[in-house]
Image (cartoon, rainbow, N blue to C red):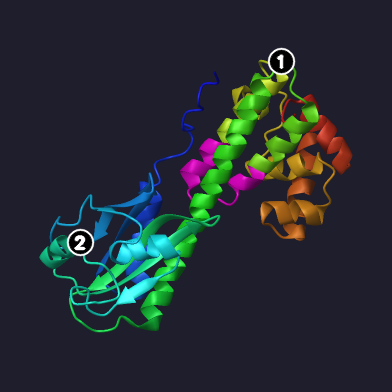
Amino acid sequence: MPVPFPRPPLRPDDTDAFRHALRLARQRTGVRTVFGGEVADGALRLTEFTGTLTDSMRGLRVVPGRGLGGYVLAHHRPYAVNDYVPATTITHDYDSPVRREGIRAIVAAPVTVQGGVRGVLYAATRDAAPLGDRTTAALLDAARRLAGEIAVRDEVDRRVRLLETAAEAPAPGLDALRDLHAELRGIAQQIEDAALRDRLRHACDRFLRAGLGPGTGAGAQQDAGPGGDRPRLSPRELDVLSYVALGCTNAEAARCLGLEPETVKAYLRSATRKLGVHSRHQAVAAARRHGLLP
């Protein structure tokens, strides 16, 4: 029986992403009270709060179809009520904690990733007055940004697992390893968290060493002393070369990395100069010779 793959150590708890989304939501909506949480095992758990006065809702488990959040879970779309307690359009399973907190007007937005709700963000006031379209739009924008971050993290997890499989296989296909190596470096550029981006690059280097054997790989250049023979290419230069190695044009590499074609050209010129060669193909060959590319 196969052993389930553990949660990759590279990925942090998504709590940090939810907290950042709530800070953004509070800033953009102008609403003091914002909160939310992740969906797990088919239910929403409220864990993150800003501007609340009590802990009455902390840890609250919201199930699909029940309450405002349950409506969002069931229908995959935002919903709002101007006065929560007397509202007739939702069930009132959670009136007690809501009353204790004293909130009345509430809007909730789903964090939707690949068709599934992964969390819900709320904005609320203690006045029975409509929060308005601008507030809803700002909350939705925060939810969409959070969904994008989670989607990137999911894709990183998927690629890390594929690279684990490739590295552990008796004879991993070199073409597949090269493709995964390049795509993982490309995904890293989409991550806003600098620390997570660096950890992903280091993980990519470890997989590269595993595929090529001990003493090789991009990370090996860090072991060279001041007089070492390995060129010190920047992460961006290696990103560009990894796609050039797959036969990508500058425009294709730029699209994969989220860069302008002229920026790709600049990185390629710099890498070529550092490697002491005169063409993109020579640069790829030299990088592989130095163990910087698979």
Dot 2: what SS?
loop
Does residue 8 appear to the left or right of 58 in the view shown? Answer: right
Q: Which residue is mark 1?
A: 170
Q: Residue at x 34, y 50 (%)?
A: 43
Q: Residue at x 45, y 64 (%)?
A: 76
Q: Position of residue 222 (x, y in %)?
A: 60, 27
Spatial CA distance of label 2 from label 1 is 55 Å
Does residue 39 appear to the left or right of 281 in the view shown? Answer: left
What's the mark number on residue 39?
none
Amino acid marked by disc 2: Tyr
Q: Nearer the viewer, residue 185 or 145?
A: 145
Does residue 145 appear to the left or right of 29 in the view shown? Answer: right
Question: Does the magenta run of residues contain 42?
Answer: no
Q: Residue at x 23, y 49 (%)?
A: 59
Does residue 221 appear to the left or right of 138 in the view shown? Answer: right
Q: In this picture, which residue range is highlighted in magenta?
A: 185-200
Q: Position of residue 235 (x, y in %)?
A: 64, 41
Q: Position of residue 277 (x, y in %)?
A: 86, 37
38 shown above or below 120: above
Q: Quadrant of the N terminus?
A: top right
Dot 1: what SS?
loop
Q: Which residue is mark 2?
A: 94
Q: Position of residue 173 (x, y in %)?
A: 77, 26
The main secondary structure of the magenta stretch is helix
